[in-house]
């Protein structure tokens, strides 16, 4: 009887060790797969950045050091700001893309313009647009806050302006928030 008890204890002990080793191997394999996935994603983001002429844009923007520090925003930051481009964060859209409202990690409220598709001509125009808009500082022009170059479609990040759209303001019946002194 004692021998049978020792045998069953040994079997349970063996099963416990095997299950424990299996769990450890599973966790190690999962950790390895996660690291490999992150590495592949990092390589893909870098490839997209270079493909979209990110280095040229960085060079253009870095001519003004104060802008270069904050100008290029990561895709990860924009996904966090918009809850992965949640439909509830949509401000509007059209034929060229969708605009989302987001809150960056530095607590700036921004409007993120995410185009539907990018072609090479648009990439060149995008670089010129960012280079020009990054230097404009006028009270009647929405300020460009930054851009994201890590995706196939290049995204612009503007300061968020509440009070609706310019179209709403121009075509509303009644008093305008613009006032006559601001129009013209």
Image: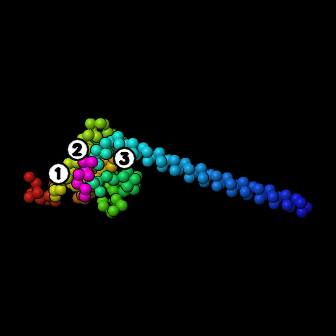
Image quadrant assignment for residue 50: top left
Give the mark nearest the N terminus, 2 or 1: 2
Direction from residue 103 to residue 21 in the image, left or right: right
Query: Is the residue marked by circle 3 packed among few (<14), some (14-19), or many (20+) residues within 10 Å?
Result: many
Query: Is the residue marked by circle 1 packed among few (<14), some (14-19), or many (20+) residues within 10 Å?
Result: few
Residue shown at the point (56%, 50%) measured from the top left: 32
Residue shown at the point (43%, 45%) measured from the top left: 43
* Gap between marks 2 and 3 measured at Cα: 17 Å
The answer to if 60 sits in the magenta stretch is yes
Residue picked out by circle 1: 171
Tag nearer the camera, 2 or 1? 2
Give the mark nearest the N terminus, 1 or 3: 3
Give me the disc on residue 88: none
Of helix, strand and loop, which one carries label 2? helix
Total residue callouts: 3
Q: Position of residue 18 (x, y in %)?
A: 72, 54
Task: Confirm whether residue 130 shows in the render.
Answer: no
Image quadrant assignment for residue 94: top left
Q: Which residues are magenta?
A: 59-66
Residue shown at the point (68%, 57%) measured from the top left: 20
Q: Most prominent secondary structure in the magenta stretch?
A: helix
Q: Position of residue 119 (x, y in %)?
A: 30, 36
Residue picked out by circle 3: 150
Q: Position of residue 81 (x, y in %)?
A: 36, 56
Residue shown at the point (22%, 48%) measured from the top left: 131
Q: Position of residue 142 (x, y in %)?
A: 21, 54
* Gap between marks 1 and 3 measured at Cα: 37 Å
Residue closest to the far right:
1
Which colour style is shown?
rainbow
Residue picked out by circle 2: 128
Task: Confirm whether residue 160 shows in the render.
Answer: yes
């Amino acid at each position: 009887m004692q021998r049978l008890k020792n045998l069953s204890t040994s079997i349970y002990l063996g099963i416990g060790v095997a299950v424990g080793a299996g769990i450890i191997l599973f966790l190690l394999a999962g950790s390895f797969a996660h690291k490999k996935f992150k590495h592949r994603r990092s390589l893909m983001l870098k490839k997209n950045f270079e493909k979209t002429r990110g280095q040229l844009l960085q060079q253009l923007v870095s001519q003004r050091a104060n802008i270069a520090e904050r100008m290029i925003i990561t895709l990860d930051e924009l996904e966090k700001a918009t809850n992965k481009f949640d439909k509830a964060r949509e401000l509007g859209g059209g034929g060229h893309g969708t605009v989302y409202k987001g809150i960056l990690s530095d607590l700036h409220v921004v409007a993120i313009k995410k185009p539907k598709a990018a072609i090479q001509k648009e990439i060149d125009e995008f670089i010129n647009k960012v280079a020009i808009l990054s230097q404009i500082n006028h009270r009647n022009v929405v300020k460009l806050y930054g851009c994201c170059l890590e995706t196939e479609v290049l995204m612009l990040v503007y300061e968020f302006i509440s009070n609706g759209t310019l179209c709403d303001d121009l075509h509303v019946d009644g008093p305008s928030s613009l006032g006559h002194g601001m129009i013209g």
